[in-house]
Amino acid sequence: MNVVLISTYELGRQPFSIASPAVWLRQAGCEVTCLDLAVQRLSDYKHALATADLIAFSLPMHTATRLAAGLVGKIKDISPVAHICFYGLYAPVNESYLRKLGGDTILGGEFEEGLVSLVKRLANRATSEELITEPAQPEPLISLGRQKFLVPDRSGLPQPESYAHLQLAPGRFKTVGYTEASRGCKHLCRHCPIVPVYNGAFRVVQRDVVLEDIRRQVAQGTQHITFGDPDFFNGPTHGVAIVTVLHEAFPELTYDVTIKVEHLLKHKEHLATLRDTGCLFVTSAIESIDDRVLEMYDKHHTREDFIKCVHLFREVGLQMNPTFVIFSPWTSLKSYLDLLHLLVDLDLVDSVAPIQYAIRLLIPASSRLLELEEVQTLVGKFDEKTLAYPWVHSDPAVDRLQQDALREIKHGQSLRETRPQIFRRIWKIAHEAYVHSLNEHFKIASLDQAPERASVPFLTEPWYC
């Protein structure tokens, strides 16, 4: 059976989401073509598509889903008889829309076993002489089974140097690889897209599989690994054991992880181990510094917890990479400025990716935010074009600031400005938006005196979700 696995976008990474199922499907006897449209051209794979029995789109994130939706028509023109599958985190929550587009099978959660089941079903149907009437989809829409993972097969993908790099300093870069040591998450943050699928469950990728995947990427020239786990400390013993063995095998290899504030404080005894085993930075979804908003998101941390974490990292010698959902229905011009000033006070300007200053709350299908009556009253009807519930801020000036911030960020990046330089742009427009109600606490001059520092390590992919 001929299978084409398609990734449209995975944050500038070599897509684990097609490398992992590729090995399962090849072991099942399939001829598998891996196509990453973030770095490859669709036109170069027309023959593989035209002869495919199954074409499966990986949907690990919102942007990837929207890009895939725009491609389905073109794919069906090339291969009108192929079975179309959508799989990954954003597939089950958008099931009805994806079926309208022509999706025959939708798989969420642990999708590898579902894909193997699907190809066997299609093969049986192709060889049967009887007319088979099947239910719309016998495979579960969401599977949370405990899989015995296989080492991802990356042989059909572009080399690691084709993807985003790690910038250590201006002109100094490392080749980046990507793996996952776990999936899902123990927590139920209301705004998180993982929750509607995993609902508090998380699944471990076996240690030997993770280590072998990394070893093969190192052999291809990878010098830094991003662990894509939603939270590396969902299973702290598992995560720490992996990086300890990894450092012993490859002492020059560096890495980064994602860990929520709650876990950073709860498991602070492991932070020195991260530092000593080559962790260059820890991404943490701070989201907001407004305690009321954090409570609505059900984040289980406070503004003060974030500040404690920053000081803890300084003591340990780790670098934090904070992320934010900075524009929400509860953002005000003053609260936006409050965050900017706090970042200056905490000396975090170099640590924040510029796009973070323009991220707007996305309320996708099945979001737990919809449990809140306040949210129900402010959103409009679900928009299939954007795959989200639309909302408009009660203060038009806040929505204008978001658009202005996004424009300034794009302009600054086009000029290859540093993070502090782009921050100054944001600082200026935010204060101008609030100029009529400034108080003594907000002084533009204080930023102008801030010195430029050496760049902290960061990944060169500028987008976020």
Image (cartoon, rainbow, N blue to C red):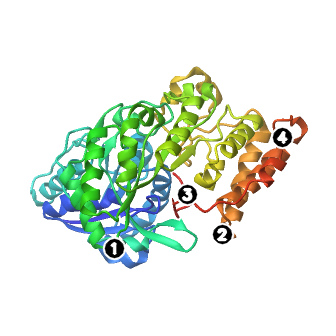
Sequence order check, earlier mark of 3 and 1: 1
Mark 3: amino acid: Trp
Sequence order check, earlier mark of 4 and 2: 2
Say few, some or many: other residues with alpha carbon within 10 Å of mark 3 (under 14 / 14 to 19 / 20 or more): few
Q: Residue at x 27, y 48 (%)?
A: 111
Relative vertical location of residue 61 with respect to residue 440 in this rendering, above or below = below
Mark 4: amino acid: Tyr
Residue underneath mark 2: 416
Q: Quadrant of the N terminus?
A: bottom left
Sequence order check, earlier mark of 4 and 1: 1
Foreground mark, 3 or 4?
Answer: 4
Q: CA separation, marks 2 and 3?
A: 15 Å
Q: CA separation, marks 4 and 1?
A: 49 Å
Mark 1: amino acid: Gly
Front residue of 411/307: it is 307
The percent coordinates of residue 108 (x first, y second) are 32, 44
Residue underneath mark 3: 463
